[in-house]
Amino acid sequence: MDESFVSFEVTTATSLPTFRCPQVTVRRRFKDVVALSRLLELLLPGTILPARPRRNFVEGRLKMTPAFVEQSCVCV
């Protein structure tokens, strides 16, 4: 069974003084990015959020073409 997956770099930034670091970067799997997007849509109705990357499957497997990777990076 193939255990490969794509991860996305997610960076959050804040100017709130309650946070020790003004910017934090983590890597997350696609399903985590989808869950975050859905949660933000629920918590922030009417807010324009960046489009999340689309999952691109060919015969049930993630198509890892250079164009797909580049498009995914742009969307995030």
Image: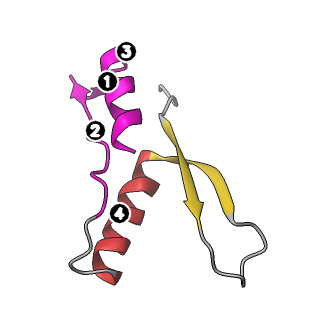
Which numbered dot is residue 37? Answer: 4
Circle nearer the N terminus (2, 1)? 2
Task: Look at the image and give the residue range highlighted in magenta.
Answer: 49-76
> What kind of residue is marked 4?
Ser
Point out residue 70 in the picture as x, y percentages from the top left corner. Answer: 37, 24
**Residue under numbered circle 2:** 55
Q: For the residues labelled 3 and 2, say whether their Cβ atoms are less than 8 Å apart.
A: no
Residue toward you, 6 or 17: 17
The structure residue drawn at horizontal position 33% and vertical position 41%, both measured from the top left corner, is 75
Marks 2 and 1: which is nearer the front? 1
Query: Would residue 65 be seen by someone viewing this image from the given angle?
Result: no
The kind of secondary structure element at disc 4 is helix
The kind of secondary structure element at disc 3 is helix
Label 3 and label 1: CA atoms lie apart by 5 Å
**Residue under numbered circle 3:** 66
**Residue under numbered circle 1:** 68
Q: Where is 8 relative to 19, above or below?
A: above
The structure residue drawn at horizontal position 35% and vertical position 63%, both measured from the top left corner, is 37
For residue 13, what is the image quadrant? bottom right
Marks 4 and 2: which is nearer the front? 4
Membership of 69 in magenta stretch: yes
Q: For the residues labelled 4 and 3, say whether their Cβ atoms are less than 8 Å apart.
A: no
Label 4 and label 2: CA atoms lie apart by 14 Å
The residue carrying pointer 1 sits among few (fewer than 14), some (14 to 19) or many (20 or more) residues within 10 Å by Cα, namely some
Marks 3 and 2: which is nearer the front? 3
> What kind of residue is marked 2?
Arg
